[in-house]
Each structure stands twice: as C-alpha cells, then as structure tokens.
Amino acid sequence: MNLFVLLKTVPDTVEELTVAADNKSLDAEWLRFKLSDADEHAVEQALLLKERAGGKLTVVALDAPELDDSLFTVLAKGADRVVKLAGDLGNLQSFSAAALFAAFLKGEADPPPADTLILLRSQAMDDLEGEIGPVLADCLGLPYVGVVTGVQPDGGTVTVTKEFAGGLRGEFALPTPAVLGIQSAEKPPRYVPIAKVRAAMKSAALETVDVTPPEAGARFPIEKMYKPEAAGRAEMLEGSPEEVADRLVELLAQQSLI
Amino acid sequence: MSKGILILAEHLKGELSDITFEMLGAGRTLADALGAPLHVALVGRGSAGLASRLGAADKVFVVDKPELELPPAATMAAVLGSLIEKQQESLVLVGWTNLAMGVGSVLSARSGLPLVNFARALRVEDGAVVVTSQLFGGKIFSDVRLADGRGIVSVSSGAFPADAGRSEKAPAVEAVDVAVEAPKITFKKYVEPAAGDVDITKQTTLVAVGRGIQTQDNISMAEELAEALGGAVCGSRPVIDQGWLPLTRQVGKSGMSVKPRLYLALGISGAPEHVEGMQGSQMIVAVNTDAKAPIFDVAQYGVCADALEILPVLTEKIKARHG
C-alpha cells in the first residue's frame, strides 16, 4: 500500500499554558509541543496496515520546535520516509495546514495511486477553525471518513469503523485513494526503545521541504483568549493522604454513599 | 430583519439526538435577539418523520432521499450549502459531535463562511454573534466575534439545556429537493457495543480512572475501591485506548454518558470530551496532581494529589467502616 501519515503538533497541556500579552494567543515562549494522541494513533494504524499489507509509509510533518525526536521515533518504529514541511509556519490554522499538506501530496503524485491511504488525526484540541482531514480530502477530491478506529483495506476499497456515541459504531466502505481521520488505532501505539531511536538518528535522515503558508491565516479575529474563571471550582481537601481519605469517607457517609 | 439561522438536526437510528434540542434552544435565543427566523435542516434517509418534534424552529427543511443514509461530511456540506444559498441563511449551527464531525469544516472551506469549533456559549452584541469556545483540553477559553452574525458554529454537547429546545408546537415543514452527487462512501452496518460486561450507565457509584493511573497493574487498585463502594470502574479515552479497560467502560464523547450518584475521578484531567459524558453525575470527587486541571471545575470536591497515593488509603478506610 501507498501509506501517508500527516502530523501537526499541539501544545503540551501538561505544561502551564499562558496567554500572551495581546490577550489573543498563547505565549509561545512557554509552549512545548508534542504529537497529539490522535497523531500517535494515526502512526500506529499506518504501521499496522504496512505490516499486514506491505508497502511504503511516508510521514509528513509540519515543522515545529522539538519535533525531530518525535520524527526519529517514527522512523525507528518503521516509517520508510519522513518529510518535514518547513517555513514561516507560526500559528498555522487548520485550513492553511490542509492546503500545505494537499500541495505536498499533489507534488508526490496527482492523482495518487489507487492503493493510497492518507491517515491523520481525526481531531485535535487546536482545531478552533475546523479539522484538517475533511478539508484536505476536499482539496484532493478524495473521500473522507473521520473518528475512525478500525481500517480494513481490500483491493480498491477500504472498510472503516467510525465511532458515533454511547459505544455505538458504524462500518463504512469507501474507494481508495482515500483520506481517513484516525481517532484510535486498532492497538495501543507501540513503544520503541531509545536505543532504536538513536540508531535511527545515525542511520536515517529527515527530509526537509521548504513551504510558504497560504496568505489566508486565521479566518476570523480572536477577540480574547483567557483562562477559565475560578468560579464554581471544587472545594479542595488538603492534608496527608490519611487526612484526605478521612474527610472523603466523612463526606461520602453524609451523602449516604457508603 | 436579519437573515436566518440554520441548525443541522442530528439523528441516529431514527432518534433525534440531544444536541439537536440543545442547539434549538440556543438558536431560539439567538434568533429572538437578532430578529431572525430559526430554521432546521433535517437531512437523511427516513428522516422526514422526525420533523414534527422540531417545533422550536420556525421552519424545518426536510431533505429525505434514499442515497442519504448517514451521508459523509462532504455530502452533508453540499446539502447545507445549497440550503444556505436558497434560504439566505447567515448563521449555521452544527454539533461538535462524532456524527457531524467535518461538516462545518468542509462547508466553511467551500462557502468562505468562518467556522468556530468547540462552542460553549453564544451571545449577541451589536448585531454580531460572540462565540466562546473551550480550547486545549479545556484549559483555555477564546471569544470570537462573527461580524453581522455570519458564520458556522460547531456547538459542544451539553453546553446548552436540551429542554429549552423541546416544543409541543408543530413547525412549518417544507420538503426540499436538493440535487447532490451520490456519495462515494457507503454505510454498511452498525456495530453495537459488546454485551455481557457491566453496564456503567446503571451504576450508582463509578470509580473512573485516567492517564494518572499510570499502568495497567494499577487498575486493580481502582477495582478494589469500586468493590468496597459497591460500584464499578470506568475510564477516560487514554485508558481505553491502551487496552487497560474494555470499550464498554469508556465515559465521554464516543463512550457512555453516565449520571451516577458518585463519580470518583482519579487521575483524569477533565478534557471536554470526557466531561461531556459525566457532568450529569450527582456528586463528583476528583483527585489529580495538577491543581489547575479542568476536572476541578466540574467536581464538588477536589484533592490535588497523586491518585495512586490516595487510592489504597481510601479503600482501607471504606473497608474498615464496613467492618
């Protein structure tokens, strides 16, 4: 199969997020970036497909600070080729990201070979102005299904499992080439030992392609960015685990929960 | 008079979803403030029969065609695009749900109308609609102003009361024939959740574990506590994705919505996708190492600590109390 995975990092929310002085964006100085969970799952699903059906896996990532370690990890896991799209990307919004990915993919082959599957995150916490996948698919004139948790290719079609709600899922069939928004891979993302990552750093190279983001930028002005107000916050219980547990037992008893 | 507001009704297996009524309630308020008509697009095979329940709207446009069985986002966007043009709608509300995912994005890309995702609040200011969204796992809010009230808003589940959108009134209904290309994507079948496991929606007490539980081995500690409390263990997405708990135990957007008497959230940050499935719980107690975790905004009681330190102590004390 001709497999692509497209990656865009998100701010690591384990770190404290600070709003910049303009009150309209995050303060870049304190941001750390990481692959989103859905990106990790898209990579895993592509690796599983490659293991099952053979083929070539190309990973394309929008450049970001501290990205290279993640990309060498992807190589160590079994990607054949990793390409960074680099340039003045700044605070790139979804539609611009879709345009950059689409331009790269068209440059590879237009139209793509019939056995092409393009996988990317179904959704992410920074998709304020929309998801990348459906817009990318529209640019490429390819079918798209999102919130995918299972992928079964079969000749010129692929059957996917999509999540709805309440544990209910649905199966859809679509012709390839196709774009799939991955929510979860069929297995948890694999672990790769650091020694293998180091070996990949020595033996493989990341390709870099210079790109110019489209002018459009954000399609609406953000008036204000702020942290949620503290109102309505929980009553915090303090003390040693012993003290906290005593207090919790007391509260549960008051509510006749124990 | 302002141009119209169009809501994409959401329905699955012949039932209207709560988000439809939540958007209708929010849409009604906006429509009244803007002096605009409130319309609903009811799209899909066999959907026409649901129109009578959408009386909070001024008019329901029905597009009921055999080829529109769970139509893909691009097809749905084409139908909405055609309705917007015909009916001169200026604001479109869609659900921020798995079912409608992508519809707003494609519609925005094609129509040039801006899309704002993750909306939790909407207000009218000088003819503009201001949308408040929750970003970055619920840690940041943003306000976006849609000038002249023009745009597409993707509304989070549970952000507005559904009751405000229910009405006994009979709406005006118009069947619309929209020419759309037959989708390349075909719906095959539903996959029901596996039966046989504990039904977490029926438990009065749930011990919920998130990333903070750290390893699969630690799940047994949560199970011990759940047993002492007479409840069951459930989890947030990362725990299910790791395969540490079965899909039937997932709480949140894709998983179950639960309303137990007690929801004990251990090592769960409280991302909006999770909160959506548990915010109706009667009493929420959260334990998390991050004092700023959004879970503390929905919990009544919070403990800023490592859940793994609290767990065994709490279990022992509850067991001791039971004797």
Image (cartoon, rainbow, N blue to C red):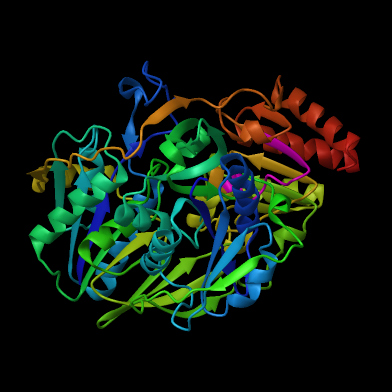
Task: Tell whether B18 sits left or right of B154.
Answer: right
Residue A2, image x, y percentages:
18, 68
For residue B139, above or below residue B177: above
Q: How many marks?
A: 0
- On the question of residue A19 being in view, the answer is yes
Q: Position of residue B279 (x, y in %)?
A: 68, 44
**Residue farthest along the top direction in this orientation:** A21
Residue at the image point whose x is 61% and y is 56% from the top: B19
| Residue B244 image position (x, y, % from top left) | 54, 55
Q: For residue A192: magenta? A: no
In the picture, which quadrant includes the C terminus of chain A? top right
Judge by depth and name the residue closer to the eye, A75 or B215: A75
Q: Which residues are magenta?
A: B274-286
Q: Residue at x 39, y 51 (%)?
A: A38
Image quarter for residue A253? Answer: top right
Image position of B232 (left or right of B8)? right
The residue positioned 15% from the left and 59% from the top of the image is A105
Position of A146 with respect to A74 (left or right) is right
Q: Quadrant for residue A115, please give it.
A: bottom left
| Viewer-closest of A61 and B221 | A61
Residue B300 location in percent, x, y?
74, 32
Q: Quadrant of the N terminus of chain A?
A: bottom left
Q: Taking the image as drawn, is residue B323 in sight?
A: no
Q: Considering only vertical position in the picture, is A147 above or below B290?
A: below
Residue at 23% across / 60% down in the picture?
A139
Taking the magenta stretch, the answer to whether it contains residue B285 is yes
